[in-house]
Image (cartoon, rainbow, N blue to C red):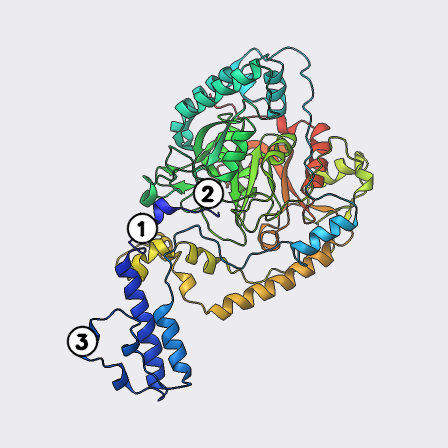
Amino acid sequence: MSGNHDTADGRAGGAGSGAARGAIRRRGFLKVAAAATAAGTLDPRTLMAAPEAASRAPGSPELIPRTPGSPELGRLREAEQEEVIPLGNGEPPALQFQAYPGGTGALLEKYWRAGKNPFEKTSIEVEAWDGPVPSTEEGIAFLPVHRLSALVRERRVSPTELFDIYMERMKRYDPVLLCAVTILEDRGREEAEQAEAEIRAGEWRGPLHGIPYGVKDLFSTVGARTTWGSAAFQTQMIEEDAEVVRRLSAAGAVLIAKLATGEFARGDRWYRGRTLNPWNLAWGSSGSSAGPGSATAAGCVAFSIGTETRGSIVSPSRRNGLSALRPTFGRVSRYGGMVLSWSMDKTGPMCRTIEDCALVFNEIHGADEKDPASVTTPFHFERSPDLGALSIGYTEDAPHSFVEKLEELGARPRLMRELPAQAASSLGAESSSAFDFHVAPGGELPPVPQGLGEAEERDFTRFRRGREGLAMDYVHAQRRRLIVMKRMAEAMEGFDMFATGSGEVGLTNETGHPAAVVQYGFGPLGPEGEEAEQPLTTTLIGDLFADDKILSVAHAFQAATDWHTRHPALD
């Protein structure tokens, strides 16, 4: 996840010191000199300086051979004069991945030719509350965001009352679920009180005003630790709100917790233990958005923000029986979040209903100059879409009951074309680059310790593997990736979306396509011997930038079913 972590960088091994920069420059100089010597084009004696010259700074003309026209001379000058800029986790590369195969410029021109304004911002109206307010705190806690919003807007429930309900549940269930890294009681209460004062004054900001939520602990927040799920960073303070937090704050949402992530965005285990599934406490929450999945399913927050590189929104949402959106790559800023892959990281909402996903996404999507891969495109959520006007496909492993219900609602689903095989992933190279400051502080890679167990060795070497490949291998992988993207575009030709049982997370994370997770049934799910009754989910994969269409279709399905209304009986 893209961000600029100056505080962390300064502590992570002294890469920014003048001495380290000088040492690295000297190493670069000597490498070039050694190569030139081996080629027989440079006399080593020319590198010998007089005693008085030896004390001069690197780059002194007396230390550089002066053979006119020598290519080695140019390389030596470059090696001496280049600045070695220290890097942390977040600085993005100059090359940016674009999900649209023809490039972002061609995408915007496509909208323009179709008469669409790609920068138009549309609002989603909240329907009025109808009927009595739930009589129990649990009944309120499990209401979807769009119903809580109606209660808050009509002053049937106040933001501080919501804050108290969710804070009490968070404190009660976190010791069991291990879903939170830091509970933000002071910040949350202050934001709730501010929202309440604004609403009393008639200044309702919109559907998320006064609604408590949690954010995955990959994102930086002022005044709270940002641990990335790792004991090595459990005291890390990054005194800046991530862009997604800023946008939610501007919408009036109330942040009450930093939610657990698997260590360095993998799995559901982190330095406090394993985040659990509220439907079955013998079962992990999956990951790496483990805390958002667990806390949202348990009613400890009204909604949450997760991230995905290769399944980390889809998997925990399916495991915990949630509705979720993994957006098209680039639609939500990653600034202020931990980077795992600049070309694959995505930020999205994890909720209890699809309509809630639309409300949250509508507030957080759009370009951000701090994330150079971000882009703005139209988003028009429809509560009552014409399913017959949409081209909906399905793979052979898609749940029959889901496809049949769509057909009953007016869709004309047809079997999806064969999808392309995915190319070899280049994730290892990007994640190793993002964490090189951590595994090789000062530019030196320490040896692997002796006596490590299999799991320990796997974790220790996770971010070292990227050093094993060639730069050309990475470039070739990206070239093949674009070929797969074009093949995927051919497979999607004439389809707005398709339903899939597997989720196709590997392929579609490489191509950047959006995915919506939606509940379609109820039954036993989980590892053998640990099954629990819980919502069953499927995945709708949309065409690029068709996030609004897949949410509209998934919402139409939920409007005709009630699988999404069920919740675990934690007590």
Q: Residue at x 58, y 26 (%)?
A: 208
Query: Looking at the image, which residue is at 76% across and 54% down?
Result: 493
Q: Earlier in the sequence, mark 1 or mark 3?
A: 1
Q: Amino acid at mark 1?
A: Ala
Give the Cα distance between marks 2 and 1.
17 Å
Q: Toward which corner of the image does residue 81 lie, by quadrant?
A: bottom left
Residue 543, x across and y down, in percent: 70, 49
Q: Is residue 564 visible?
A: yes
- The residue that label 3 is drawn on is 52
Q: Secondary structure at mark 3?
A: helix
The residue sitting at 59% across, 19% down in the picture is 203
Q: Are marks 3 and 2 in contact (CB under 8 Å)?
A: no
Instruction: State whether residue 477 is above or below residue 569.
Output: below
Q: 448 or 37: nearer the eye?
A: 37
The residue tagged with tag 2: helix, strand or loop? Answer: loop
Q: Do callouts 1 and 3 mark residues in contact (Cβ within 8 Å)?
A: no
Classify residue 81 as left or right of residue 523.
left
Crowding near pointer 3: few (<14 within 10 Å), some, many (20+)? Answer: few
Residue 491 lies, with reference to residue 556, above or below; the image says below
Percent position of residue 387, x then y: 79, 38
* Residue annotated with mark 2: 336
The span from disc 1 to disc 3 (Cα, nearest Å) is: 37 Å
Say which of 187 and 395 sits in front. 187
